[in-house]
Image (spheres, rainbow, N blue to C red):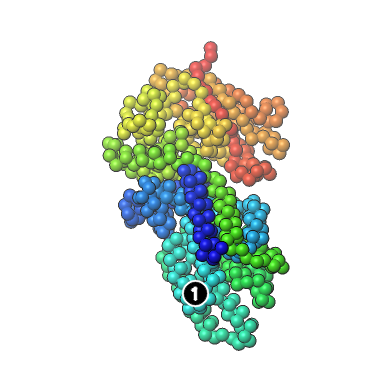
Amino acid sequence: MTRTHSRLVVAAVAACALVFLLVRFGPYFQTSSFDLVQHYMLVDEIMKYGEIRPDAVDRMRIMAFYPPATHWMAAVIGWIGGSGLVGINLITIASAFLVYALIIGLVGEGSIVRIVLFAAAFYAFKFTKAMVGYEVVLNFFYPQLVGDVIYFGILMWLARSGDLLERVIVLTVAGGLTMWVQPLASVHIFGAGLALLAFDGLHRWVREKQLPLRYFAYVLLAAIASAVIVVEHPVFKIMRRISANDGALNFGYTHIMSVAILCGAIGVLNLVLRLRNRGTYVDSVLGCAVVAATALAVVQFAALKFHGDGSAYAIKKHMFLIVTLGIMNAVRIVTLPIRMKPVEDIAGAATMACATAIACVVLHGFTEPVRPLVRVLSYANSATNIGFPPFAPGNTASDDSALPVIANVMVSLTAFQYPFNDKSIAWQGGASIRHDVKYVMVASSPDVDHKCEQRYAEGTDFVIVPSSCLSLYTMDGPLNFSTAGNGRQYSGDGWNTPESWGTWTDGKADAELSFNLPKDKRGPFDLDADVMAYITPTHKAQTVIVSVNGKDVATWYFDADKEGPAGHRTAVIPADLVKEEKVSIVFRTPGAVSPMQDGGPADERVLGLGVKAINVRAARE
């Protein structure tokens, strides 16, 4: 088989693999991170207006200044295919595949042994959740994943290009342009490139016993150009401000800097072996890349510790590259004693197969069908375009119980232009959406028609109504707090996201349940609740205090013995507490703990009261 024929075969395998991934995961999106909402806000802004308007910052906050290149890519796909959300998905899926095709191509260098060993290492270290690709697993840093593709593409090019001036020019241009994609990837391109140029100069000096002054002059020129681009680039200045936000980013280990230094040490060992003429030039590239990446993380760590600049969150974002590069260098070192003859066609096909398998692991969270959300977005955008009479930006939200919370938040912040503020952030944690807006979009139903006389933009599937009418509780059955239940529409602050069985209240706050009663319904009432508490061998008991319209009416006890950790609990609501239509029930859970505090799973939620169903009915005489 000729070299050209082999490359065509590998290209065909790669194309088939990419098509498979796009078909398999393209119709779905992940719901684990609300970062997706913020990125879609930017894509939606571009699709609607062809730019990011100056006043967009009032609604999107700092996100209005985020590097927009990947969002423009998604918007272009959206203009062609009709959905910017699908555009984000397709870019993410393609990036997950391409980045590992590059990674495995680099580490394997035509060797089946290295390819298999790297794949085994990936699966062995999945628990870390800190390898490239995991940027879109628990969080959704999809621009960073796109930046990773560019980064490893540059490393692949460096492994094959030897002209010094060409390298200086390409590194400077590529690093500068990547700033518009993701500044972190840009800085790592500069770092890896400069480290490699410096190491090559050192290697030449050792080999030739003479300092290559002209060579190091070019390196100095590249370093100055890189520093100017980084320091003066407007996007980098914005991202420095963003880096001060300390968000949630959890790995499968705790000693972040120790792991980073260990990976850097593996890279140093690989470079020492190269100075002794072991390995190939790829080892120089990979060794310099991980040493530079570790150095950048250490610099950011020092800036945080000594100057308060940045955050632990920003430091952790380096770890995806550092851990992956550390594993790549380790695989190269371990296989040094093994004599391997490159088999280009077989290794190329194996590279694409492994890249596909790893991409499937990365994308396994893409399980929520995207079509229903696209349909809701289309309806909501049409409703705002026709301008249903009471609409104004920020006075309407989506609260369709058939959709996950992330989808309702996405529709509210884009189609209905609700601002990205503390209230919409609270929605992501389970707070009631409809309590914060005047109008709400819900699924059409006879119940909605019965409760709400005012209805706008009525369609086959959806309708927009005043949120106040949905608070009417006709007492014709229990409130169900599962994902598909009706309890969420009456839930105020202090609730977590509904689950298949029910909903936990937030043990750190009062959990409010409020509704309006029909005018002919007044107390007394019986309250019956199917509930449970978080009881373990170390958290042996939990007290729940129930109040109605500001007055305590019951105290419930839970334990592992007499009272039990779950079951039905009751309370009587006296008539004098329900003199008006509005009823506000509050659950307080003093002393509640999180599973993590209790030595259990890595769940930071403080679990108060687990509510399956609540029924309020006329008191029995």
| Closer-to-camera residue (205/107) | 107
Q: Quadrant of the N terminus?
A: bottom right
- Evaluate whether residue 252 shows in this view: no
The residue located at (28%, 39%) in the rendering is 387
State the residue position of label 1: 167
Rendered location of residue 57, percent (x, y): 37, 54
- Horizontal side of 551 relative to 452 (left or right) equals right
Q: Is residue 90 above or below residue 529?
A: below
| Closer-to-camera residue (184/236) | 184
Q: Quadrant of residue 292?
A: bottom right
Q: How many marks?
A: 1
| Closer-to-camera residue (506/15) | 15
Helix, strand or loop at label 1? It is helix
The residue located at (32%, 40%) in the rendering is 382
Q: Residue furthest bottom?
A: 210
Q: Residue furthest front?
A: 1
- Horizontal side of 11 relative to 444 (left or right) equals right
Rendered location of residue 180, percent (x, y): 43, 62
Q: Residue furthest top?
A: 621
